[in-house]
Image: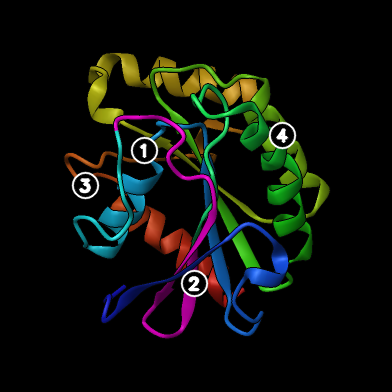
Amino acid sequence: MEIKSAVFVKSAVAADQAPSPILNEIAFVGKSNVGKSSLINVLLGRRSLVRTSKTPGRTQHINFFLINENFYFVDLPGYGFAKVPLEVKRQWEPMVRKYLFDRSILKAVVLLFDIRRVPNSDDIRMLDWLEEYNIPTIPVITKVDKVSSGKRSSQVSKIAEQTGLPPQAFSCFSAVTREGRDDVWERIISSLSA
């Protein structure tokens, strides 16, 4: 995919604040600190279009990025161990569920898993929501450069077993080496054209 333009459009905390549902959307979601912002930046060939942070939970809104004036990347708030106020955590589930339920132009969700972690109940809950709403899912295992090649296979197997997905369903990605970038793009393009 040739990226001619990638522009931050707006942040939203409610469905009526989102852009008009005209162009297709690909959303990104995962635990806080799973590497979501880094993945989006690498896919777009930008260093800092999406803010990255060492502090988990910095994304607390739904952020829309217009790509090639043709479709949107949507950065959903991270879930899990984020050190955010309790009130923000309470708002997270209804905000994200409403987005997933309402956006008829949502073509797929890229769901991220850290290769060093076994999926927990938050990850499984997200998978359940995507299945409940019949949303195509692109599962991506991030930070694969953080483990040895010998350990990678066993970690992928553990993640697959916990999620109930086959190991071949996952794309492996590294923001450091750019491994997996083309594979993830192929799956996004396929979802956009479905």
Q: Secondary structure at mark 4?
A: helix
Residue 24 lies, with reference to residue 51, above or below; the image says: below
Residue 153 lies, with reference to residue 137, above or below; the image says: above
Mark 3 or 2 closer to N-term?
A: 2
Mark 4 or 2 closer to N-term?
A: 2
Residue ID at (28%, 61%): 49
The stretch in magenta equals 54-73
Q: Secondary structure at mark 2?
A: strand
What colouring method underlies this structural image? rainbow
Cα separation, mark 4 vs mark 3, equals 35 Å
Mark in the foreground, 4 or 3: 4
What is the x, y in percent for residue 31?
51, 32
Q: Is residue 58 magenta?
A: yes
Mark 1 or 2 closer to N-term?
A: 1
Residue ID at (66%, 79%): 21
Tell whether 147 sits left or right of 159: left
| Circle number at residue 178 | 3
Q: Secondary structure at mark 1?
A: loop
Mark in the foreground, 4 or 1: 4
Mark 2 Cα within 10 Å, few/some/many (few <14, many 20+)?
A: many
Considering the image in quadrants, where does the C terminus appear? bottom right
Cα separation, mark 4 vs mark 2, equals 26 Å
Q: Can residue 103 be spotted in the picture?
A: yes
Which residue carries the number 4 mark?
A: 90
| Circle number at residue 35 | 1
Residue 14 lies, with reference to residue 7, above or below; the image says: above
